[in-house]
Amino acid sequence: MLFRIFRIATVATALAIQSFQPEALAWFDNTHLAIAEAAGFELWYSAAAPDVAKSKSAFNAIETPNHYFNNIDNREVDEAMVMGQVARYDVPGDREGHLYGAIIGAVREYRIVKASGKFALYPLVFCAHYVGDLSMPLHNMAHDDFNKAHHSFNDGVIDKIVRNNIALIKKNMSVIVVNNESDLAREIALVAESARKLGMAMRKENRDMTPDEAWMQVSRSASLLSAALAYAKREPFAN
Ligand SMILES: [Zn+2]
């Protein structure tokens, strides 16, 4: 009987955690906001919105694969892989995911909408979010048992204090110059590789990210986002 009660309690707790922290969020909201603010994005306060959108079941199949790449063969990420994912942006039901292409897809969408003269910033909100996801190791490796077991903790390594430490992110940012889509793809691949290699080390050592590692990763995202925004806003807007 005692065992049954314990079991029911365990299941109830698991369901409660699941409903508040759906799987594969990547960084929690505060971390996404901090990355976007450090990068100087004017809509930084919306940078967690794409996770809100994907939590709605009607959008889940379209939005969720934009947030990760399930790298089951542990392939090195390069410019060609990034560009090979662009056509899959917003294509529903792609279980492998296409985070790298989604960043470029969102930038393209911004430039197309901007060229039409309409309000165009919302695609950059998606871009800002995806560039945040990019530095999260567990979104760049196989979604296996290790990944599932460690996901939630690693999403929140610095989340409680990150909003009060934007200066720490800025301190570690580097200047990246993006002049064209090819440059952007190469820089996406570099951040993805830093995350993938960190993820491999975490799996090998069966451990979580340290706060120092998390600070470094979010600074990489902020550096890239700053460059991606500058490139996206460069005129003329014909893609
Ligand atoms: Zn996400």
Image (spheres, rainbow, N blue to C red):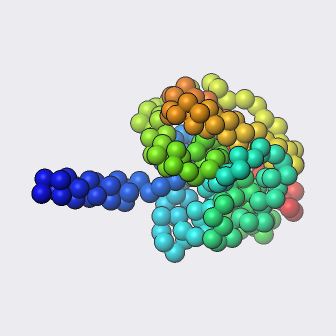
Q: Position of residue 182 (x, y in %)?
A: 87, 49
Q: Quadrant of the N terminus?
A: bottom left
Q: Position of residue 100 (x, y in %)?
A: 72, 53
What residue is shown at x 41% (from left), y 36% (from top)?
160
Frontmost residue, 60 versus 223: 60
Give the left or right position of residue 179, taking residue 212 as reference.
Answer: right
**Quarter of the image where one finds residue 188:** top right
Frontmost residue, 46 versus 150: 150
Q: Position of residue 39 (x, y in %)?
A: 64, 39
Give the left or right position of residue 190, taking residue 157 as reference.
Answer: right
Q: Position of residue 66 (x, y in %)?
A: 64, 60
What residue is shown at x 26% (from left), y 58% (from top)?
12
Residue 226 appears in the figure: no
What residue is shown at x 78% (from left), y 61% (from top)?
86
Q: How many marks?
A: 0
What residue is shown at x 55% (from left), y 30% (from top)?
205
Looking at this view, name the residue that lies furthest to the bottom: 58
Looking at this view, name the residue that lies furthest to the left: 1
Q: Quadrant of the C terminus?
A: bottom right
Residue 194 appears in the figure: yes
**Quarter of the image where one finds residue 8:** bottom left
Frontmost residue, 169 versus 27: 27
**Quarter of the image where one finds residue 191:** top right
